[in-house]
Amino acid sequence: MSGKTYEKARQVIEAAEAEPERFGDLPDIMDKSSVHAATKTLRQREREAARSELAASAKDIAPSDRWSVELADVLTYQAGQRFDFIITDPPYPREYLELYGVLARRALEWLKPGGLLVAMAGQSYLDQIMSMMSEHLDYYWMGCYLTPGQPTPLRQRQVNTSWKPMLIYSLPSATYSGKIFGDVWTSQRNEKDHHKWGQSISGMKSLVGQLCLPGQSVFDPFCGAGSTGVAALEHGCLFYGIDVDTQSVDITKARLGKVIK
């Protein structure tokens, strides 16, 4: 056993002894499967516990005039206002593809004339996604979101990808009225502690910082655990978000509350 493997095994045993109700089964997993499997389970449970604790703290967060996050569905949400930017990261699996079309259709109500919709996407179904979105909006540009050192293996295509397309659309026949921006943004590292599909603060700050001016409004209709919101607030923007998952909404509130105290 290597020293690294021994250290992982030691952590598993110590966790099981310290909290037998939560981790008591991990030594059996280690014996029957592998040290790696037990360690992976340990980290997953630790993340879940941390997420639950953070979500519970949202009840102590005071309302703010700088941000608003609600439990709502992209299909039915009524915003009551328009936004300078919609910056979002919808889910990528095939069963969620239609949400890109829904997003584009709802952006007709949500986006200000002269604003932009910026949606992160996977590459596997990019042609279908762009076709759905172009039914409702005008294609404006495609940016590149780099994830160096964080390759994602796409087994169905035999590709390790280290970047993501950022699809940029405007309202039909509208003219973008914002600042000149670069079209390459970089995430410095993976950050999945708050959400299994979460994006890094470094990546979203790179994106928001190049696109938005302080004081502008940013809306994320798939806000997840709120990385876009944190980046927007730290840049001096206003942020509005929705999600269909209660825990994600509470985690977002807790994270934003720490930015605006």
Image (cartoon, rainbow, N blue to C red):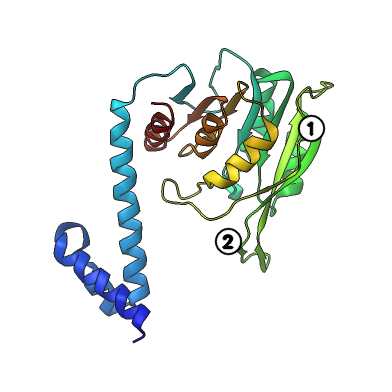
In the image, is residue 216 above or below residue 255? above
The quadrant where residue 251 appears: top left
Q: Position of residue 244 (x, y in %)?
A: 46, 33
Instruction: Give the residue displayed 68% in from the left and 35% down from the top.
Output: 118
Instruction: Give the residue displayed 30% in from the left and 42% down from the top.
Output: 52
Instruction: Give the residue displayed 65% in from the left and 60% down from the top.
Output: 162
In the rendered image, is residue 61 in sight?
Answer: yes
Say how many tags the image has. 2
Q: Tell me how far mark 2 sits from mark 1, CA to CA.
A: 28 Å
**Quadrant of the image containing the C terminus:** top left
- Residue under label 1: 180
Q: Position of residue 114 (x, y in %)?
A: 76, 21
Element on which disc 2 rests: loop
Element on which disc 1 rests: loop
In the rendered image, is residue 89 in sight?
Answer: no
Give the foreground label among 2 and 1: 1
In the image, is residue 59 above or below residue 35? above
**Residue contact between numbered discs 2 and 1, judged by CB atoms under 8 Å:** no
Q: Nearer the viewer, residue 142 or 10?
A: 10
- Residue under label 2: 150
Q: Is residue 243 left or right of residue 43?
A: right
Instruction: Give, as a three-letter code, the residue at label 1.
Output: Ile
